[in-house]
Image: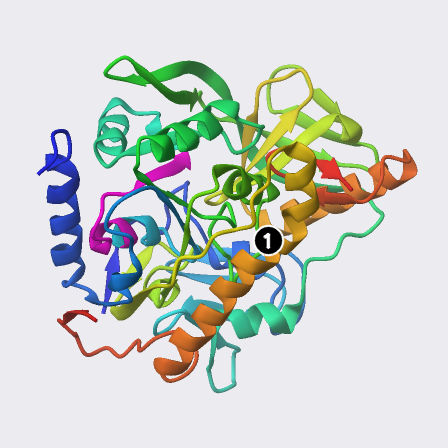
Amino acid sequence: MRRGYLFYHLAAFLARNLFRLVGSIEVHGLHHVPKTGPFLLLANHESILDPILIQAVCPRPVHTMAKSTQFASPFMSWIMRQVKSFPVRRYQVDPQSVRMVLRRLEQGEPVGIYPEGERSWDGRLQEPRRGTIRLALRAGVPVVPCTITGSYEVWPRWDRAIRRGTVRIDFGEPFLLPPAHDRSEREALLPAAAERIMGTLASQLEAATARSGGRGINTSSTPVSTFEST
Amino acid sequence: MAVPLAVHDGEDVVAIRDLLWACPACRSVESLVRSGRAEQCASCGARLRRGRGANIVLEVPGQTPVARHAREWADLIGDPQDGEEDVSARVSLRDVARSWPLRERGELLGFVERFGSDIPGLLILTRDAIRFQPDTGPNRIWPILDVTAVQPASSKLQLKVRGSEVVTLRFVSGSVRLWEARIQQRLREAWRAAGWGEIVEFQPRVSAR
């Protein structure tokens, strides 16, 4: 185990097992996650559970951007740093968070970002933040599309209670965005890149929902206790 | 079975009214008030509570309860609309009390802020300004064209105004989603009127094509 990652793996283990108290996690497409080298993990965001569960099941430790207020208390700040999160101030352009993403990628690490920038109120995929798309173009590393379904049924943004349910996480096939050498090229490629990323997430979500038998995911009150990887 | 993670009659709580800015039964705007673990329309008496998964159950007195997915209720009431008139809501405002660089083993990870104590007051949105009238202390007036970001955060709204630190607003009984839409709409109109173009993004910075 790599130095500095003991707590991360412990937290991932705990998250996977504690979630069994309220449901189950189905994971698909783990073979799409690159075994070495940097990549950007771009995921939809429908619940506060998403980053915890995605990091818990991803076979490689993922560094993630998280809103700066989550680091406000010393205890939470320590936890967040142990699970390899770094802060972003979402209400202003935050060049340090961009530097952090690029630095981690240069170090060969995966970085996870939620291109929608915030949780969805109604569970639907939202418009991406243009800054994230610019960053993906600038990074020039493989993009791994990741979708999570069912977490909205378990813990939606408008409630503070967890309900039983199955969460499904799909890692899609990595793809590369066209190379952009400078800012003007990035701006020109922005709409197509946004379409590519969000279109991939949308179709992956649609497929996952269809496989789960319709809207959302099974929210049966019967506890399920599988942790299935395919 | 539900695992309650917060006391629902607490102050800082997300609510169905944040999603449903109007009562699905009578369409009254911002009429939902907390009633135990449910919310009740002050206008028609209908109750809304969470059902299975992300379902919301509507209970209208004298009628059979109707359970629908949150998304369907949201579609039914449509997107929040803003009128021309001035609107107001009770809020708790918090200023940034402290911000600092966050480091890990000497490496700068980013910048973090902590918000101070609640300042209760009235938030008033007019065509060209956002005004905060605290219960005690001087008023604050932010010209709408000085707003540089509108960012929802959990059940709060963060506002960044040119030349000031960010403030966070918690709506005591209003819908954060409705207020986000209202402020965005006023910004759109103000930007158009000023010839600054069509706004395409409100975070991290209000920007136009």
Q: Residue at image x 43%, y 78%?
A: A215
State how many labels appear: 1
Kindly identify the amino acid type of the residue bearing the numbered disc 1: Ala
The N terminus of chain B - image quarter: bottom left
Pointer 1 local density, CA inside 10 Å: few below 14, some 14–19, many at least 20: many
Above or below, A212 relative to A194: below
Could you say which quadrant of the image residue B113 lies in? top left
Expressed as whole percent of the image width and height from the top left, the position of residue A132 reads: 53, 42
Q: Residue at image x 26%, y 49%?
A: A55
Q: Is residue A40 left or right of residue A95?
A: left
Expressed as whole percent of the image width and height from the top left, the position of residue A208 reads: 38, 74
Q: Is residue B187 left or right of residue B48?
A: right
Per the image, the residue denoted by label 1 is A194
Expressed as whole percent of the image width and height from the top left, the position of residue A43 reads: 42, 54
The subunit letter for the residue under badge 1 reads A
Magenta stretch: includes residue A65: yes
Expressed as whole percent of the image width and height from the top left, the position of residue A87 reads: 40, 29
Q: How is the image coloured?
A: rainbow
Above or below, B72 relative to A79: below
For the magenta stretch, what is the residue range?
Answer: A54-67
Which of the two residues, A37 or A150, is positioned nearer the viewer here? A37
Q: Is residue B115 left or right of residue B200?
A: left
Magenta stretch: includes residue A203: no
Q: Residue at image x 77%, y 31%?
A: B144
Q: Secondary structure at mark 1?
A: helix
Above or below, A176 relative to A219: above
Whether residue B76 is visible, yes or no, is yes
The C terminus of chain B - image quarter: top right
Q: Residue at image x 63%, y 64%?
A: B43
Which of the two residues, A48 or A61, is positioned nearer the viewer here? A61
Q: Is residue B104 left or right of residue B158?
A: left
Whether residue B46 is visible, yes or no, is no
